[in-house]
């Protein structure tokens, strides 16, 4: 499979190494200011760029009919426009706030726990996310996905990273050098404390998941998520 890497920072380089190890070819390595020369040769595009150029990257590939896997966060106010474009071009698009197998299992655990805890009003829910200091968006896309699942199953209406209201899920955001990603969900009451946590040791899991998603999306049409790739939609 021929891959266009739209974003060639630390994650892009790890994705490249894993893709090559799995026998694939990289036909474009595009950084934020680079050109799209070579994109038309790709079987699939993997976008791990930055919020300011993600929509341009994704749109360029979709307009050529190239399926796109995107792990860039911080651009989702334009998500519905990308979905519309994908349908218009009869293309394929997969967005994931996190491509790690472990995190996607963690998503399912968080969803289940939120449904369970919704009836126990004595527990107050909150979250913490920790990432390296180079991460541009706050909170992380993974944290937003976790918070939205909690909101869907409880009486919370929104999330907040400062000055939370009673109906907000508070996300304590921390930026610390060399932390790939740590996400925790807390349920605290007067008598006890429940915590679930995912700790990433490195970027390998994210990169491998992105390459697996790219392998999976070849030949498909529509809008997908990692639930589809990992077959987590089935009960």
Image (spheres, rainbow, N blue to C red):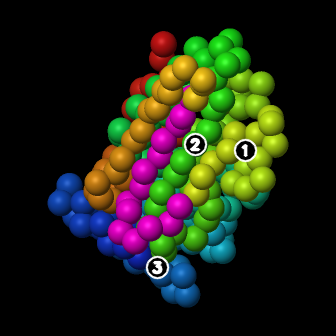
Taking the spot 36% from the left edge, 47% from the top edge, the residue there is: 199
Neighbour class for label 3 at 10 Å: few (<14), some, many (≥20)?
A: many
Regarding mark 1 in the picture, which secondary structure is present there?
strand
Q: Nearer the viewer, residue 157 or 86?
A: 157
Find out whether the residues at labels 3 and 2 contact each other: C-beta distance under 8 Å: no
Find out whether the residues at labels 1 and 2 contact each other: C-beta distance under 8 Å: yes
Q: CA distance from mark 3 to mark 1?
A: 34 Å
Q: Position of residue 136 (x, y in %)?
A: 58, 70
Where are the magenta residues, as a range? 174-187
Q: Is residue 82 left or right of residue 18?
A: right
Q: Quickly name the residue at label 3.
A: 30
Q: CA distance from mark 3 to mark 2?
A: 35 Å
Q: Quickly name the residue at label 2.
A: 127
Q: Is residue 142 left or right of residue 88?
A: left
In the rendered structure, which disc, 1 or 2, sits on the residue that comes first in sequence? 2
Taking the spot 66% from the left edge, 66% from the top edge, the residue there is: 55
Q: Is residue 124 left or right of residue 66?
A: right
Regarding mark 2 in the picture, which secondary structure is present there?
strand
Question: Can see residue 32?
Answer: yes
Q: Give the answer, above or below, for where 187 lies relative to 208.
A: above
Regarding mark 3 in the picture, which secondary structure is present there?
strand
The nearer-to-camera label among 1 and 2 is 2
Q: CA distance from mark 1 to mark 2?
A: 10 Å
Q: Nearer the viewer, residue 74 or 48?
A: 74
Q: Position of residue 176 (x, y in %)?
A: 44, 67
Taking the spot 24% from the left edge, 60% from the top edge, the residue there is: 18
The nearer-to-camera label among 3 and 1 is 1
On-image quarter of the N terminus: bottom left
Neighbour class for label 1 at 10 Å: few (<14), some, many (≥20)?
A: many
């Amino acid at each position: 499979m021929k891959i266009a890497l739209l974003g060639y920072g630390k994650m892009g380089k790890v994705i490249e190494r894993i893709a090559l190890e799995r026998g694939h070819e990289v036909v474009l390595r595009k950084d934020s200011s680079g050109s799209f020369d070579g994109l038309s040769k790709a079987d699939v595009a993997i976008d791990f760029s930055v919020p300011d150029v993600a929509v341009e990257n994704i749109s360029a590939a979709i307009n050529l009919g190239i399926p796109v896997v995107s792990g860039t966060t911080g651009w989702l106010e334009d998500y519905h426009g990308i979905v519309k474009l994908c349908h218009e071009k009869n293309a394929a698009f997969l967005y994931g706030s996190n491509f790690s197998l472990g995190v996607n299992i963690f998503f399912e655990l968080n969803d289940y726990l939120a449904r369970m805890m919704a009836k126990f009003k004595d527990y107050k829910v909150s979250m913490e996310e920790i990432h390296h200091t180079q991460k541009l968006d706050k909170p992380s896309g993974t944290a937003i996905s976790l918070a939205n699942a909690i909101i869907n199953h409880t009486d919370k209406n929104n999330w907040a990273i400062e000055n939370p209201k009673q109906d907000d899920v508070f996300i304590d955001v921390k930026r610390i050098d060399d932390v790939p990603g740590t996400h925790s969900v807390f349920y605290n009451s007067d008598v006890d404390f429940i915590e679930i946590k995912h700790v990433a040791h490195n970027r390998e899991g994210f990169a491998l998941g992105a390459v697996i998603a790219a392998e999976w999306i070849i030949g498909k049409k529509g809008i997908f998520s990692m639930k589809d790739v990992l077959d987590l939609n089935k009960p």
